[in-house]
Each structure stands twice: as C-alpha cells, then as structure tokens.
Image (tube, rainbow, N blue to C red):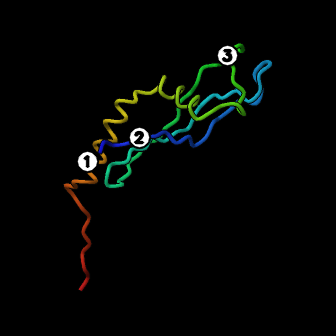
Amino acid sequence: MANTYRFVISGLHAKIQEGELSNVIESVHWRYQAEDADGNIADVYGSVGLEAPDAESFVAHEDLTQADVEAWLEAKLDVESLKAGLDAKLEAIANPTHHTISLVAE
C-alpha cells in the first residue's frame, strides 16, 4: 500500500478589514502528514503568506472549504518535495539506523 498524505490546517491569520473586505486571510499555518501501511505517521509544518485577494474572486472566511485552502497551499508549496521528505521520514521510522540507549547506573 502506498503512503497517504493530507493537509491539516492549523490556523488562518486574517486582517480584520481591508477596504470593503472583512477577515481577509493573509497566511495559512499548516501541517502536511504522511501515513504508511503500518500506521506510522510523519509530518512537516509551516506557514504560507498569501497575496491580497481580488475583490471579485474573494471568498468570505465562513464560506471557505478545506479544498479552497489546500488549493492555495498547493499553489505555493512544492508538494512533491514535501512528499519525498515525508517518505524518507517514514522509511527511517520503518527501518531505523540509530536508537537511543540509556546508561544503567550500578
């Protein structure tokens, strides 16, 4: 089974008023997660700044969907690179090359 990926939107930072528009989203705080067939999960997080919206195509925050925000992220981020990095993290989880050991006091 191939790894599955998903965006988790942690928050939207909005300007209260910009001209005639209210609650204009200026940045998106996100996590991108990958899960392998064994249930191991890896993720990466960040934030992305957005350009000022066109008043004619503006979507009010209460009408935004997950798909809308994901489309903004996909337009700004190198999703294939994120996937490759997450795949490497999952590989390291599944096939570790290092571990932590404790010194036992006598």
What residue lies at 72% left-to-right and 34% top-to-bottom? 62
Q: Residues within 10 Å of mark 1 (few under 14, many from 20)?
A: some
Q: Whole-percent x and y of residue 2?
A: 31, 42
Which residue is denoted by mark 2 in the rendering?
Answer: 5
Identify which residue, 6 or 11, lies in the foreground.
Answer: 6
What residue lies at 35% left-to-right and 29% top-to-bottom? 80
Earlier residue among tags 1 and 2: 2
Q: Amino acid at mark 1?
A: Glu
Q: Amino acid at mark 3?
A: Ser
Report if the CB atoms under discs 1 and 2 are less than 8 Å apart.
Answer: no
Identify which residue, 103 or 26, lies in the foreground.
Answer: 26
Q: Going by the picture, which residue comes out furthest to the right?
A: 20
Q: Which mark is residue 57?
A: 3
Q: For mark 1, give the secondary structure.
A: helix
Measured in 3D between alpha carbons, the distance from the residue under mark 1 to the one under mark 2, in whole angstroms, is 15 Å
Q: Amino acid at mark 2?
A: Tyr
Q: Which mark is residue 91?
A: 1
For the N terminus, the image quarter is: top left
Q: Is residue 99 above or below residue 7?
A: below
Measured in 3D between alpha carbons, the distance from the residue under mark 3 to the one under mark 2, in whole angstroms, is 28 Å
Give the left or right position of residue 58, taking residue 70 as reference: right
